[in-house]
Image (cartoon, rainbow, N blue to C red):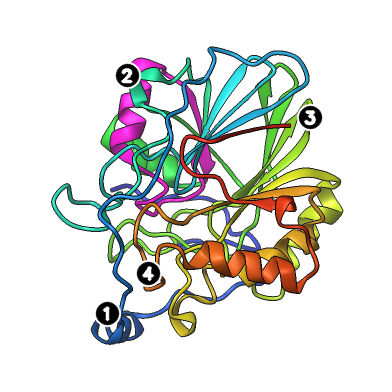
Amino acid sequence: MANYTGPVSDHFDGTRFFDPDGAEPKGVGEVLRWRFTHKPAKWPERAPSHVDTPPPRVDGGSVRLSYVGHVSWLIQSASVNILVDPVWSDRASPFSFAGPKRVSAPGIAFDTLPPIDVVLVSHGHYDHLDLATLSKLAAKHAPRVITPLGNDLTMASHDEAIRAEAFDWHDRVELGSGLAVTLVPTRHWTARGVFDRNKALWASFVLETPAGKIYVVCDSGYGEGKHFRRVRDAHGPLRLALLPIGAYEPRWFMKDQHMNPSDAVKALEDCGAEQALAHHHATFQLTDEAIDAPLKALHAALDHANIPRERFAALQPGQVMEI
């Protein structure tokens, strides 16, 4: 697979990307320690989901957000239809027969999707960059695919029909009808295999809509909260934040790269969004916590911070919010 080449920057050393305010992902020894000592909670084979049949377009000044599951969203506004990290596959894995298996059905059946204009793909991990889904979208809808540097090469090596456009942190991309998206730094990492760690970039997104800006955080650790405060300062005020709350146990292994619900509540306070929606939970069992643990912990963290629970909601797949 081809690797990204480009000029050295404050987050690219000529070979690999890095976050100056982040932490390196765990090494092989630590991965093996987790795999041989962890005690994952038992998940059900199936979890509740709903079925949404979205309209062809949403006009006017509103935004319709339909939760597909995990980190996949359909965002409709100003007659533009946007998918975030679309995963319709049964497994978040390079294999069709092994790896984390979906327990909640997608909230929208693939064949009932409206015309898709734009896809945002945050990074290369298999639960976010699903080549099978991107190929199906390319064949049926031919959307623009906006992604951080290097991930376009992964897509092109699989299917040249995927219309991937790669951008760096802080690049702003016009999407049409007054919508735009800016790629912003996030505390994470990426890889598709053993030897390509951080050879592509990862990002969060700030989406400009008629109803206000939506901060889309697909995967992130919390750290000291710098990235969230910087987005507030550079892009605020924010109408809505989509924040991850799952895949966080054990903390010694996951803390640097994945927020737990308490971290996500701090991130909401740091970025200053009016409201938040939770994701990255209850779809694929990636880590050790129980399927319902993130939601329970989110409610506890909100209560502890004296934040109304309705300010940070968790939808089930197929449920919809409009702003």
The correct choice, above or below, for 196 with respect to 153 in the image is below
Of callouts 1 and 4, which one flags the residue occurring earlier in the amino acid sequence? 1
Counting residues from the start of the chain, the first of labels 2 and 1 encountered is 1
At a point 83% along the width and 51% down the height, the residue shown is 234
- Bin the neighbour count of mark 3 within 10 Å (Cα to Cα): few under 14, some 14-19, many 20 and up: some
Residue identifier under label 4: 287
What distance separates the C-alpha of mark 3 from that of mark 1?
44 Å
What residue is disc 1 on?
35
Whole-percent x, y for residue 256 in the image: 54, 75
- Nearest to N terminus: mark 4 or mark 2: 2
Left or right: residue 44 versus residue 65 is left
> What residue is shown with label 3?
211
Residue tagged 2:
139
Q: What is the secondary structure assignment of the residue under circle 4? A: loop
x 77%, y 54%: residue: 231
| Displayed quadrant of residue 125 | bottom left
Q: Does dot 3 land on a helix, a strand or a loop?
A: loop
Whether residue 140 is in magenta: the answer is: yes
Residue 59 percent location from the top left of the image:
69, 13
Looking at numbered disc 1 in the image, what kind of residue is underneath it?
Arg
Quadrant showing the C terminus: top right
Q: Is residue 90 above or below residue 33?
A: above
Residue 13 seen anywhere in this rendered image of the structure: no
What amino acid is labelled 3 in the image? Ala
At label 4, the amino acid type is Thr
Instruction: Give the distance between the C-alpha atoms of the residues marked 2 and 3, in whole angstroms.
Output: 31 Å
Q: Amino acid at mark 2?
A: Ala
Evaluate if marks 4 and 3 touch, with contact meaning CB atoms under 8 Å apart: no
- Please tell me whether residue 152 belongs to the stretch shown in magenta: no
Which segment is the magenta one?
Answer: 121-148
